[in-house]
C-alpha cells in the first residue's frame, strides 16, 4: 500500500507542471486526497465494512468534490486534475497511470446489480467534462476528448471526440514508455472535415453541370476564424 501511495504522488508530479514538492502535493491536491480516501474506503469495503466505507466515501466527496464509490477498482498512479465534479461508479474499473480531468463521469446505464460501469485501460487520458457510460471498455493508451460522450467500446491506441463519441485510430500509436497524452487541444473536427469534403464535392459537381458555383463559400479562413453575413451577431 505504501508503494501505491508513493506512486499516486509521483503521478501528480509527472503530470502537473505546477506541482513543486511532495509536501505541497500531499497537502494541497484534492484529487490526490480523493484517491487516498477511495483507497481507504475500498479496503473497508473489501472487509465487508460497507457502511463505514460509504461514510468515508461521503466525507471525501464533501471535502474534495470527487465521488468515487468504494466498490470501484482503481489501479496505481491515478491522477485527478482539478478534482471537481468527478464521478466514478461502483462497478467501474480503472487501470494504472490514468489521468482524469474535472467534470468526468464514469457512469452506469442500468438499474440492474450487474457490471454497469466502464472499464478503463492503462495510461488513458479522459478530458474535462467527458462522460463514459455503461459497461464499455476503453483500450490502453487511448484519449477521450473534452466533453465527449462514450457509449461503446474504444480500441487501444484510439482518440474519441464528439457526441456521441467517434473513435479515431491513432496514426502514431503510443507505447508504455511514451509520456502521458495530456494535450487535449489537439483534437480533430470530424464534423467540420466531413462538411468541408461534402461542400467541395458539391462545388465540383456545379462546375461540371453549370460551369460556375452558385453557393456561397462559407468556410473559416486560414486562421480558423469564420466571417460572413450569415454569422452576423
Image (cartoon, rainbow, N blue to C red):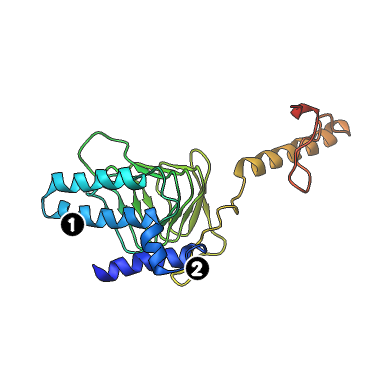
**For residue 189, what is the image quadrant?**
top right
Q: Residues within 10 Å of mark 2 (few under 14, many from 20)?
A: few
Q: Secondary structure at mark 2?
A: loop
In the rendered view of the protein, which quadrant contains the C terminus? top right
In the rendered view of the protein, which quadrant contains the N terminus? bottom left
Q: Is residue 180 above or below residue 154?
A: below
Mark 2, residue position: 179
> Mark 1 vs mark 2: which is more N-terminal?
1
Q: Is residue 205 above or below residue 83?
A: above
Q: Which mark is residue 25?
A: none
**For residue 206, what is the image quadrant?**
top right
The x, y position of residue 208, in whole percent, is 83, 36
Seen from the viewer's position, the closer of residues 63 and 177 is 63
Mark 1, residue position: 43
Q: Residue at (37%, 60%) from the top-left corner?
A: 27
Kindly report the distance in space between the C-alpha atoms of the residues bearing marks 1 and 2: 31 Å
The x, y position of residue 78, in whole percent, is 37, 59
**For residue 51, what is the image quadrant?**
top left
Amino acid at each position: 500500500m505504501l508503494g501505491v501511495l508513493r506512486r499516486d504522488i509521483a503521478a501528480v508530479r509527472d503530470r502537473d507542471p505546477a506541482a513543486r514538492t511532495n509536501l505541497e502535493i500531499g497537502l494541497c491536491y484534492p484529487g490526490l486526497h480523493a484517491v487516498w480516501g477511495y483507497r481507504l474506503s475500498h479496503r473497508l469495503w473489501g472487509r465487508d465494512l460497507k457502511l463505514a466505507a460509504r461514510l468515508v466515501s461521503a466525507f471525501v466527496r464533501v471535502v474534495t468534490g470527487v465521488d468515487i464509490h468504494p466498490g470501484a477498482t482503481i489501479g496505481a498512479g491515478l491522477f485527478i486534475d482539478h478534482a471537481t465534479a468527478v464521478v466514478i461508479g461502483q462497478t467501474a474499473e480503472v487501470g494504472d497511470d490514468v489521468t482524469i480531468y474535472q467534470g468526468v463521469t464514469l457512469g452506469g446505464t442500468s438499474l440492474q446489480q450487474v457490471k454497469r460501469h466502464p472499464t478503463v485501460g492503462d495510461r488513458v487520458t479522459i478530458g474535462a467534462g467527458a462522460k463514459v457510460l455503461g459497461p464499455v471498455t476503453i483500450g490502453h493508451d487511448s484519449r477521450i476528448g473534452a466533453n465527449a460522450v462514450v457509449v461503446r467500446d474504444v480500441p487501444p491506441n484510439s482518440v474519441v471526440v464528439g457526441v456521441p463519441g467517434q473513435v479515431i485510430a491513432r496514426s502514431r500509436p503510443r507505447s508504455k514508455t511514451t509520456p502521458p497524452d495530456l494535450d487535449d487541444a489537439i483534437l480533430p473536427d470530424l464534423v467540420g472535415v466531413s462538411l468541408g469534403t461534402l461542400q467541395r464535392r458539391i462545388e465540383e459537381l456545379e462546375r461540371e453541370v453549370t460551369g460556375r458555383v452558385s453557393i456561397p463559400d462559407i468556410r473559416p479562413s486560414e486562421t480558423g476564424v469564420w466571417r460572413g453575413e450569415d454569422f452576423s451577431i
